[in-house]
Image (spheres, coloured by chain):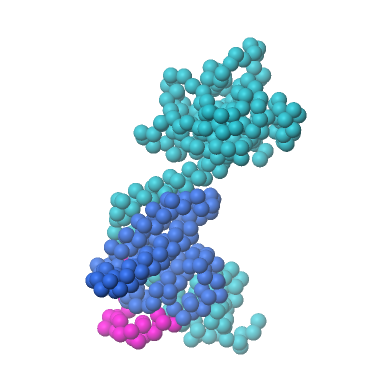
Amino acid sequence: MPREVTAPFDVEPHLGVLRRYALVLTRDPDEADDLLQDALVRAIAAAGTWRPGSDARPWLLSILHNTHVSRKRRRQVEAAAARELALDPPATSAPRQLARVQLGQTMTALMRLPDDQREVLTLVALEGMAYKDAAEILGLPTGTLMSRLARAREALRRVLDGGGGAGQAERPALRVVR
Amino acid sequence: MMPSEPISDVDLQAYVDGQLDMPGRIEIERRLQAEPEAAARVMEELRLRDELRLFLADEAEPIAPATVALARELSRRLRARASRLRLRRAIAAAVLIGAGWLAHAEFGLIVDQVAAAHPVPALAAEAAAAVDLLRAGVSAGEGAPLRLAAPRTGGEVPIPNLGADAHLLRVQPVPTPDGPGIASLYRLGSGALVSLLAAEAGSFAVTWPQPATVNGRPTVFWQAGPFAYALSGEVPGAELLGIARRAAPGPWPEFDSPSPTEGTPHG
């Protein structure tokens, strides 16, 4: 289906995709909402870097991605500091609440992949996403993106074939439950 | 071409990810006909991609109001940025035209001779567009006048008073090549919208309000010493000229204004 044509500066139509991408990145719905809000705040501060006339979606996705990376890094630093000070570790490994979001077999399998593989598979699945744009969003050379993508596909297929033990009992869903 | 050669993984991947142009897709599909195993794998990949795509097309749960509010603020900024770039060109044209009338020889400015000879087109279209652009950003409660410093002249760029009839709706700073400018949107008592563009010009000139009509929208320009102005709106040209004359610091020579010039944008 063709994407709805909207004014290039209209952000609201992209919120659904941004939130779902945030969910793929964080694997936690509350974290995903936090990340999305963080990213929007950053985008507001960085509005001057948007090129008028260009599609806002890749720009927004790359801000979301960068925000996620720096949040992760900050947490690692915090966790390391906490370890050093022998404090209780901050709640970085909060219990995953993905159960709140109903995922089909495929998405359940995807969520088991490492971060970098989930990212590429998700971005490239977006309608109209060129390799070049996806590579730019992730800050990778296109060649690296393509090889990572091939590895991610292989890993996903392995998980789906039962290597990960996920969804063996379930029959392949005819319709993905969202 | 070479149907015996198996299709490369790179090609299959590019096919699944929609990276190929139509001839490329057709070629892969033609070769897949002869390779049932590869075809089945491609169908599986396409299914996985579609399931992901369906997951990403999230409309299930409502977005948090705080998130929506942030998104709206961001949209507003991006829209402002888009109109700023349009208005930047408009002000640049206004300054150029103001300079062109009196100053280009004396001040050694590089003036577009076409613009100087036909002062209407470029700016008029942009100033007229500014009405719509600013109107798009109008929201309730805005309307505090902004002050604009005039670094070269010293002090501030005076914003002409359009009279008690003009209610200020929205003000927006506008960068110009010569420095900051300012665009204000007013609603007149009649309900019509007019936009006023003001900037510190790159040169000194005094020109009386000059009427023009472009794309059906009347526009008036003038320069008062180091400051350039453009007024455009949804009112008859004579009325707009009247507003500009009352607003512009006169006295203006009392003679019939030149007949409105028709022009079309040539930018």
Query: Who is closer to the viewer here, A65 or B235?
Result: A65
Q: Which chain is blue?
A: A
Q: Is residue A176 magenta?
A: yes
Q: Quadrant of residue B5?
A: bottom right
Residue found at the far right of this picture: B105
- Residue B97 horizontal side relative to residue A105, left or right: right
Query: What's drawn in magenta, residue-wise?
Result: A153-178
Q: Can residue B117 be seen? A: no
Q: Is residue B75 magenta?
A: no
The image position of residue B106, as x and y in percent, is 74, 28
Query: Who is closer to the viewer here, B251 or B54?
Result: B251
Q: Can residue B266 be seen? A: yes
Examine the rendered structure and indicate whether residue B96 appears above or below residue A107: above
Residue found at the far top of this picture: B254
Hue used for the chain lettered B: cyan
The image position of residue A160, as x and y in percent, is 36, 82
Image quarter (top left, top right, bottom left or bottom right) of the C terminus of chain A: bottom left
Q: Residue at x 53, y 17 (%)?
A: B246
Examine the rendered structure and indicate whether residue A152 appears above or below residue B172: below
Image quarter (top left, top right, bottom left or bottom right) of the N terminus of chain A: bottom left
Query: Who is closer to the viewer here, B43 or B170?
Result: B170
The image position of residue B85, as x and y in percent, is 56, 43
Q: Residue at x 56, y 33 (%)?
A: B151
Q: Residue at x 54, y 35 (%)?
A: B181
Q: Quadrant of residue B146?
A: top left
